[in-house]
Amino acid sequence: MKPIFFAAAFFAASSVQAHADCAADIQAVMQAHMKAGPYHATMDMTAGGVARKMDSDVILPSSFHIKSAEMETIMLKQGTWMKMGGKWLAMPAAMSGMVSQQVMTGMESGLKNMANVQCEGPQPIEGLTLNKYEMDSAGEAMGVKATSHITMFTNASGLPQIMLIDGESMGHKSHIVQHITYDPSITIAPPK
């Protein structure tokens, strides 16, 4: 679960003056992303030779509904629930605040620790033309350090739409392809 939160948890100032404007552009994209409202993300991840797919509804900073073949989790300010054996189980009360804080800390840490930033302008991907950014980043979430090379493509509104993340954490490498769709109709509620 930790590598998944890393991936969802940290993105995006270079100390090289030539990259200052590009780093500021990436910072602005990620700040806009954090304020853009509800979104749906699909994530295809390969780590340790194992492929996984996750679907998430997210309302930053503290609401998540995550589904995969192995589990389903709902995290809100008032609680966290995991579906196990077809039944929803409440997790310890402190878990929601801890996870939310780690996600936001991971994002902020990733933004502060960007290096090798590149703003490449409009580029083709998946039949679309989106603005492409690349960067290396390092961060820490839930006490575990990770490094990543991130390729981010933004839509016409300047928000992340496709992200390719090649990361390493605890000696394990991962590759993630994430697609983001912003949808103000998304709501996340406790399980029934």
Image: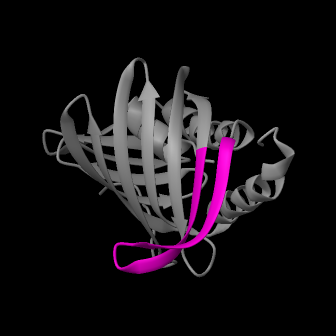
Left or right: 182, with 33 as reference point: left
Left or right: 26, with 169 as reference point: right
Residue at position x 46%, y 42% in the image: 7
Residue 91 can be seen, yes or no = no
Residue at position x 68%, y 36% in the image: 109
What colour-coding does the image apply?
one colour
Residue 70 in picture, x, y percent from top left: 19, 41
Residue 104 in picture, x, y percent from top left: 63, 43
* Screen quadrant of the N terminus: top left
**Main secondary structure type of the part rendered in magenta:** strand
Q: Nearer the viewer, residue 43 or 164?
A: 164
Left or right: 22, with 2 as reference point: right
Q: Nearer the viewer, residue 190 or 120?
A: 120
Residue at position x 67%, y 63% in the image: 29
User: Is residue 152 shown above or below 174?
Assistant: below
Left or right: 20, with 11 as reference point: right
**Image quadrant of residue 121?**
bottom right
Q: Nearer the viewer, residue 92 or 182?
A: 182
Q: Nearer the viewer, residue 31 or 165?
A: 165
Q: Is residue 124 magenta?
A: yes
Q: Is residue 14 magenta?
A: no
Residue 80 in picture, x, y percent from top left: 43, 41
**Image quadrant of residue 34?**
bottom right
Residue 142 in picture, x, y percent from top left: 53, 26
Give the residues drawn in magenta, as a range. Answer: 115-135
* Screen quadrant of the C terminus: bottom left
